[in-house]
Amino acid sequence: MAGFDGGHRLRGWDSMAIVTAHELTRTFRTRRGQEVTALDRVTFSIAEGETVGLLGPNGAGKTTLARILATLLLPTRGTAQVAGWDVARQAKQVRRAVGLVLGGERGLYRRLTARQNLRYWAALQGLRRKEADRRTDEVIERLGLVARVDDRVETFSRGMVQRVHLARALVSDPQVLIMDEPTNGMDPHARAGFLRLVRELQGSGVTILLTTHDMLEAQELCARVALVDGGRIVRAGATEELFADLHAPRMVTASGVPEDLRSRLAAFPGVSGIDGTDGDLTLRVVGEEEANQVLLALAGAGVRQLAMAPPNLADVYRTIIADREFAV
Ligand SMILES: Nc1ncnc2c1ncn2[C@@H]1O[C@H](COP(=O)(O)OP(=O)(O)OP(=O)(O)O)[C@@H](O)[C@H]1O
């Protein structure tokens, strides 16, 4: 199993890990000469084929970590490897293994067409002309860019720009995709389309590290998340584990519940609250199995209008990351 710990020791190391970081630290010196620790002894590993979400407030260190893994930035201390290559000493090999997807305008030439951007990138990645053309055509097709591929990127909507970003990352057929807020600023349709593409990629076995502020997106795509704050991983694990550890409830809603069943349900394991009147109930239930038992009891009593909402990663986030809305 790949694993994270609170920050210092390497835990759960195994040969299946495709991304590893050990005590990874990055400091910056500001113009005023102050030292800022953007990443502070971060240790983790990601197993091949996994999608891991990196969550945390502004300035937590997510982009710094993404940039180090993509070799755009050197660590100050500590080490990281991608596909067995060291990000500091074997940057060239790491670059071949990694595709970086940024949000917004960063990293694309707006005056060039999508195809020109992709070919240029393929050449930078060291692909031969024929191979570059073949891969470019392949990703254009795969990402639904055919109709606009010879238009300049500056004429594209945000959603299209993000597709070009993804296409660019995929041209070299990377083992690991690092996505830094890839859906930032996209409208709901563009976002849904983009996430569909990411899910297809997951099906093809690529490993993904995703930074995002969108908890629904993280919940939808990532079986495992790491919460970062002040340059440290403050909590990490499978989302289901976090829900269980933090007693995050599932919400079961039901209509037409007989009164006697309501009082019986109140005593069910995991049931932490029941709201509603006249048989229209909302039950908070902690634990997947416990919620299933509640559903079974309701269905067994002939209740047909039933629904269950999973726990919410946003609640987990708010529990772990302190509110600093008014912090200066
Ligand atoms: N080039 C730099 N020079 C000085 N400080 C920097 C530099 N890059 C990042 N930092 C600082 O490092 C810290 C971490 O920044 P980083 O961009 O990694 O955070 P983030 O989690 O990606 O934030 P956001 O969610 O806003 O993108 C911040 O305090 C930031 O100001």
Image: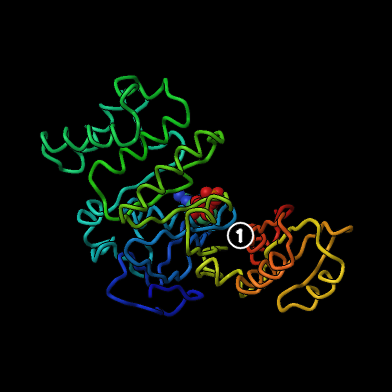
- Residue at disc 1, CB closer than 8 Å to ligand 1: no
Q: Quadrant of residue 46?
A: bottom left
- Residue type pointed to by label 1: Leu
Residue 42, placed above or below residue 92: below
Q: How many marks?
A: 1
Question: What residue is shown at x 84% (from left), y 62% (from top)?
Answer: 275
Say whether residue 32 is visible: no
What residue is pinned by disc 1? 313
Question: What residue is shown at x 35% (from left), y 53% (from top)?
Answer: 203
Residue 43 at what x, y percent from top left?
Answer: 42, 71
Say whether residue 252 is visible: yes
Question: What residue is shown at x 54% (from left), y 56% (from top)?
Answer: 219
- Left or right of residue 216, residue 210 in this image: left
Residue 32 at what x, y percent from top left?
Answer: 54, 52
Q: Quadrant of the N terminus?
A: bottom left
Q: Quadrant of residue 111?
A: top left
Q: Nearer the viewer, residue 46 or 312?
A: 312
Disc 1, SS = helix
Q: Nearer the viewer, residue 41 or 292?
A: 292
- Left or right of residue 205, residue 180 in this image: right
Question: What residue is shown at x 30% (from left), y 52% (from top)?
Answer: 204
- Left or right of residue 99, residue 89 in this image: left
Q: Dot 1, how many residues are within 10 Å of its Cα: few (below 14), some (14-19), or many (20+)?
A: many
